[in-house]
Image (cartoon, grey):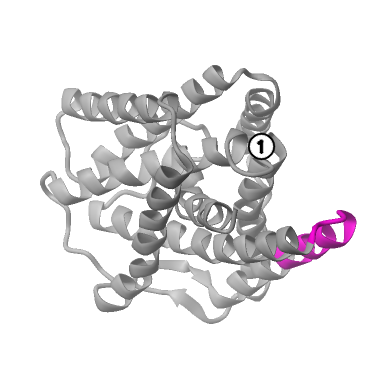
């Protein structure tokens, strides 16, 4: 197994420290601002993937989507609004595996695709709203709850990487992402479920919260794989290996949050609809 490049490690350490400070010490306004900036950077990368070639148009799209996310994050949100938004996210991500099966390879993207531009904006905003909801609005909302939800994505990634490199034989979706294997998915799931078991045993959960966090964990873990494949499918159609080079050693912001885009709305869906 090849060693991890130092640049990749250094970038990861900087990102984790900055994220930890923002998550646990920043005010709610600053936290929302950071989410808006992440959305803007991701949207800028997305525009490049879906056929926008003009640099000014790419910047404008990223700025507009980031601004829309900020407005949504700063506006008061009723519980009913959050529930229906997360339901929309759930329904979308449930249809994606069917799209993988029916059309595994998209036609080459050569010009801006209005559907992908609009859909991408919606995905980023819904993911940002779900993060804010788990951080400060949901029942038992806290930075720890959001960190746990994000940790599901990271555990799936790490477990899948290690087990896939060691045991990977059967391709998960060879036409979309040839490097991913079923063994990697099961390895990531095993790590995630082990951590879930520790969490359930270590904390004296009320019965309702115990099954809620278990269901949210399982849904988010599966969705993180779908989100990863969704971006890979778009990148193949765009003929790009990474969404950008904003993060040295890691590619783009979108490459780091592709699983989050799918996992966090589903985790938040369970929390919102079982409150």
Using the rendered view, name the quadrant where residue 187 is placed: bottom right
Residue 84 percent coordinates (x, y): 39, 52
Q: Compared to 106, does 26 lie above or below? A: above
Nearest the eye: 90 or 63: 90
Q: Give the residue drawn at x 61%, y 47%.
A: 150
Return the residue at label 1: 9
Nearest the eye: 91 or 262: 91
Q: Is residue 203 magenta?
A: yes
Quadrant (top left/top right/bottom left/bottom right) for the N terminus:
bottom right
| Total number of numbered discs in the rendering | 1
Residue 213 percent coordinates (x, y): 68, 59
Q: Compared to 180, does 42 lie above or below? A: above
Residue 170 percent coordinates (x, y): 53, 81
203 left or right, relative to 190: right
In the image as oriented, which residue stretches furthest toward the left?
Answer: 111
Magenta: main secondary structure: helix
Q: Which residues are magenta?
A: 192-206
Using the rendered view, name the quadrant where residue 41 is placed: top left
| Secondary structure under the numbered disc 1 in the rendered image | helix
Q: Compared to 60, does 150 lie above or below? A: below
Residue 272 percent coordinates (x, y): 53, 51
Q: Give the residue drawn at x 50%, y 62%.
A: 223
219 left or right, relative to 61: right
11 left or right, relative to 101: right
- Is residue 162 in sight in this rendering? no
Nearest the eye: 88 or 43: 88
In the image as oriented, which residue stretches furthest toward the bottom?
Answer: 170
Disc 1 packing (10 Å; few <14; some 14–19; many ≥20): some
Q: Give the residue drawn at x 55%, y 24%.
A: 31
Q: Give the residue drawn at x 49%, y 43%.
A: 130
Q: Is residue 195 magenta?
A: yes
């Amino acid at each position: 197994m090849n060693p991890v490049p130092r640049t990749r490690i250094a970038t990861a350490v900087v990102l984790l420290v900055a994220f930890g400070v923002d998550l646990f010490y920043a005010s709610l306004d600053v936290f929302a601002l950071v989410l808006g900036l992440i959305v803007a950077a991701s949207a800028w990368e997305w525009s490049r993937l879906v056929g926008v070639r003009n640099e000014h148009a790419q910047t404008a799209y990223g700025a507009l989507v980031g601004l829309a996310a900020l407005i949504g994050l700063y506006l008061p949100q009723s519980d009913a609004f959050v529930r229906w938004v997360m339901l929309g996210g759930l329904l979308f991500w449930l249809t994606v595996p069917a799209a993988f099966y029916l059309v595994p390879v998209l036609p080459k993207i050569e010009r801006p695709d209005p559907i992908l531009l609009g859909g991408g904006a919606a995905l980023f905003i819904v993911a940002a709203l779900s993060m804010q909801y788990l951080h400060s609005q949901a029942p038992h909302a806290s930075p720890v709850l959001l960190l746990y939800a994000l940790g599901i994505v990271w555990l799936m990634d790490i477990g899948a990487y290690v087990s896939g490199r060691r045991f990977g034989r059967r391709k998960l979706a060879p036409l979309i992402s040839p490097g991913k294997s079923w063994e990697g998915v099961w390895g990531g799931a095993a790590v995630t479920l082990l951590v879930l078991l520790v969490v359930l045993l270590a904390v004296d959960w009320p019965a309702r919260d115990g099954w809620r966090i278990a269901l949210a964990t399982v849904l988010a873990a599966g969705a993180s794989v779908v989100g990863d494949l969704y971006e890979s499918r778009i990148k193949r159609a765009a003929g790009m290996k990474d969404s950008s080079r904003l993060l040295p050693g890691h590619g783009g912001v979108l490459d780091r949050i592709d699983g989050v885009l799918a996992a966090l709305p589903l985790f938040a869906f369970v929390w919102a609809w079982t409150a």
